[in-house]
Amino acid sequence: MLKKIGKREESLGKEKQTEAAGGVTRRQLIAGAAVTAGVVGTGMLLPRSLQAVEVPKKWDREADVVIVGTGFAGLSAAIEAHDAGAKVILIEKSQVIGGNSVIASGAYNAVDPGRQKKQGIEDSIDLHYKQTLEGGDFRGDPEKVRFLVEHAMEGVEWLEKMGVVFEPKVYTVIGALWPRSHDPANKGRGGAIVRGLKNQVDKRQIPVLIPCALTGIVRQKPAEGKVLGIEAEYRKKKMYIKAKRAVVLATGGFSADVSMRSKYNPQLDKEIPTTNVKTATGEAITYSEDIGADVVGMDYIQLLVACNFYTKQYGSLTNLGIDSAVFVNTEGKRFVAEDARRDVLAAAILKQPQKVLLWVADERCTKRFNPAMTEQILKDGLAFKADTLEELAKILNAKFSMPEQTLLETVRNYNEMVKKGKDEEFGKKSANLKTIEQGPFYASPTQAGVHHTMGGLRTKGTTGQVIDRYGKVIPRLYAAGEVTGGVHGTNRLGGNATADCIVFGRLAGISAAKET
């Protein structure tokens, strides 16, 4: 216990250092919302009135395991449940499979001695565990975090068996804190993982109902007994699907539901964009609460520096990496460490003029989008490219009235610190310090958007079973991925979400198939 207290004090000390350096903390970001959110964010309000779905007289379909959602978690659960001997049905409310997973970067954090040692990277399971807990202000469930980091590399190897190919080198995706992020090969991104898993679902002839939206969960009694199946709307008609063994919820979070997210953090109103697909609306959480499920950390909502300034939508950026790159405001000045926690980055950007940063990078900046996409972004005027820094400074002066000499001085000072091996301004880690001097040069005007809801259903860390308000397992109900809470605490590390979905999706599928 003393060690944990010491770590929390160390974490608080780091926040104070961040503030002193000109950055801001998550606590500052939500300070204005604290009173309004109050106990709402704890998930410990008095139970809402239960809107139970009655047990139908007739079921329209049935399977051993019914899985809701076709992102990383849902597809993984389906494959594992099938391979464990269960008959499976998948449903997806959108017109296409994949949910947020199909548009995600696909970065996957895992300690990988095979790749990391070749790059001279020292890493360990314990370090990943420590950084994940600290990165979430120790609000994550230690049992779940430990399970995640210990099984993350197994997930990479399993995906490779499923046909997904990863790049031979790892890197530090934005907000990851350490170079352990794996990317699908050939700029494949999240879509490559979805395609690989969907191919395996098809190979196993697992039926996928599209579009089919969850409208309720059927339990023997409103807050008692086993989960029997689901109520859904399929092709505009109500239907009931019986789950002879279990239901697995893998529906993602609620970043796209303005009313739901602003309920827990009033600052996240309609003026703040989201990186998510429009179907990320969180109703599975509500339907689970209707049958007695507990929730955790609902006010822990992450913003990601990944929305284009002009379109207010996710993407249309020329860069993903944070080496050979600096984040500057419209005054041409750095204002935060580029490899800081995502909540620190988001809070810092919201304090800048026009709430925008310019992601300035050279040709070597790790992890750029595929060349064709980058060229289209540049052609559309959503980002900028120049052969020299001087030319790029002129463009940014014309677009944002950025003082040219200030930008050039910022980059010059940064390069000098890189050569010294220490970021004396904001403390960017030495592993991510690389000069910005090889043209051509790029600038992506970027804003923060609501990206990930760390809160969700409370689940048991080693089985994926959903827990009720009294700490008891709801029989035959499982959940995995962003629909759950307790893994990431207050702040998710970049690259941990894909691992979360794969590790706990597989777990939920295997566990659900064991039900009798």
Image (cartoon, rainbow, N blue to C red):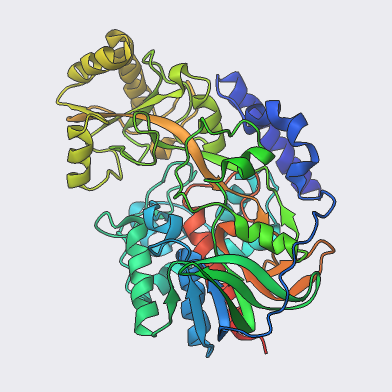
Label total for image: 0
Name the quadrant containing residue 230: bottom right
Q: In which quarter of the image is the C terminus?
A: bottom right
Residue 464 shows in this picture: no
Q: Position of residue 19 (x, y in %)?
A: 61, 22
Q: Is residue 230 left or right of residue 50?
A: left
Q: Is residue 70 left or right of residue 395?
A: right
Identity of the residue furthest to the front in this view = 237
Q: In this view, does 55 lie to the left or right of 439?
A: right
Q: Where is residue 214 in the image (x, y as percent from the top left)?
A: 57, 66
The front one of 421 and 448 is 448
The front one of 215 and 196 is 215
Residue at image location 70% in from the left, 33% down from the top: 12
Residue at image location 47% in from the left, 29% down from the top: 337
Residue at image location 39% in from the left, 85% down from the top: 204
Residue 37 shows in this picture: yes
The front one of 54 and 111 is 54
Q: Where is residue 390 in the image (x, y as percent from the top left)?
A: 20, 16
Is 102 situated above or below 355?
below
Identity of the residue furthest to the left in this view = 387
Q: Position of residue 55 (x, y in %)?
A: 72, 78
The front one of 209 and 98 is 209
Is 396 situated above or below 443?
above
Q: In this view, does 159 lie to the left or right of 386?
A: right
